[in-house]
Amino acid sequence: MKNALQKLSKSRFGKRYIGDRAFYMAVLSIVIPVVIQNSISNFVSLLDNLMVAAVSTNQMNGVSIANQMVFVFNLCIFGGVAGPSIFAAQFYGAGDRKGVRDSFRFSMVIAIGVSAVAALIFAFFRTPLVNTYINNPESTEAAREMLEVGSDYLMIMMAGLLPFSISQAYASVLRSCGETRIPMFAAVASVLVNLVLNAVLIFGLLGFAPMKAKGAAIATVISRYVEMLIIVIMSHTREKKYPSNPAYRFLEGAYKNFSIPMQLVKKITVKGLPLLLNEAAWSMGMAMLAQLYSRLGTDVVAAQTITSTIANLFNVFFLSMGTAASVMVGQPLGMSDFEGAKRNVRRIMFFQMCICFTIGTMMFFISPLLPYCFKEADAAIREIATGMLCVTACAMPVNGFAHCSYFILRSGGRTIITFLFDSAYTWLIPIPLVYALVTYTPLPILAVFILCHAADLIKVALGAILLKKGVWIRNIVAASE
């Protein structure tokens, strides 16, 4: 077996797609901390949902609906800091410390601005937003409870918007410089605090009154402050302790003079605004798909919550490869090493497909057992969730290819193309398809879910064409130097 692997790695195919030890060490040094961080976070999210579900299904549905809004905000933050992080990765590859620092400053400005806008929307429109997801409830009392739970949950979550945004501004630039450990440590500490406080506040342990879903929201907000404090303190401590380490040098004097060159502001805005709009539009598209599915009944809302919570535990592997792609492609592009960037793309995509087929197969075979973790869910909900999990497992290679394609295109600053590839596709293909199926056909949720995922093969074809054409091969920081 070992000899066969050695022969394969030395063959023409192996040299082109498999890569050497140094390549995998570099990829895994980025991916493993992100996988650990996201795995713990998603596992705690699973436990959170189990705790809330143990109170009642209506409580779980209310929190799930509110989290659709929080999901849109989170993606807007990710999109907002993505533009500066693209430049930071290429500046870092070019050895331009000042460029990385200016990118970080702009990332902070965007994070604070997006948080302020989101807080205003949640403050004035949270109730009507939650109400759009409550369709065909079992009773008037159930609808009232879900609306109250979701609205109250969003109101509390407003306090955690700013610390989350600051954490992501730091984390995005640190990862662009190849530092993934600090964001991992901060996130792990945050989710552990969240887990403990959830148990205490939801069920009323240690003398506290039971707060149900409100307790889950308060625990999440506190954990976000913990994450922010750890990532900020650790980053600046490392910068002082290791002044020669290039991964932290951008923090030197980051707040002494917060000016950002107008030329760079314009460049990041031109490249970054489509990413912010893309994440906002894509996340709203995902929320719209969830709303369309919810028209088939509240059982579907509960099944979606179970499916997404469990699927996220498996998706961390292929989603983390997006971070690796950003760094492993962005840094050589910043050095104008275009052949090295193309070589990394081939190897990353091959590695991604191997991961997706392996994890997807594992997920498919254990999917029938996983919904039984939610003991409060009835048989109908578990049956729907099982089917949706099996479909998600089969679609993992498709989603993995599209996900990596997006990050590779983004690394070269092709943000308009990524906007069309990601969010425009979502609003032009899956959403109209699901709307038509839900509105004009008697198809059950599982059939609609399958057809929606099958449509993503179009996205895979588009991604393959764009990658082959090499539209992403650009050094976008050369002019700034």
Image (spheres, rainbow, N blue to C red):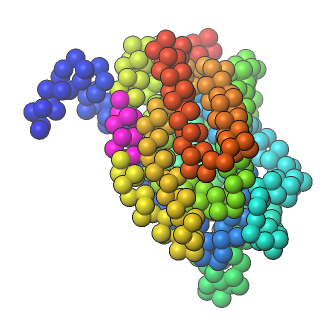
- Which corner quadrant holds the C terminus? top right
Q: Nearer the viewer, residue 201 or 306?
A: 306
Q: Position of residue 201 (x, y in %)?
A: 66, 77
**Res 200 quadrant in image:** bottom right
**Res 65 quadrant in image:** bottom right
**Res 211 quadrant in image:** bottom right
The residue shown at (57%, 71%) is 378
Name the chief secondary structure element in magenta: helix
Q: Position of residue 237 (x, y in %)?
A: 54, 49
Q: Is residue 463 visible?
A: no
- Which corner quadrant holds the N terminus? top left
The residue shown at (56%, 46%) is 447
Q: Magenta part of the protein: which range?
A: 350-360
Extreme residue toward the front, this view: 442
Q: Nearer the viewer, residue 128 or 386?
A: 386
Extreme residue toward the right, this view: 124
Q: Compared with residue 171, is residue 132 higher up or lower down, i.e. above or below?
A: below
Extreme residue toward the left, this view: 3
Q: Compared with residue 136, is residue 405 higher up or lower down, i.e. above or below?
A: above
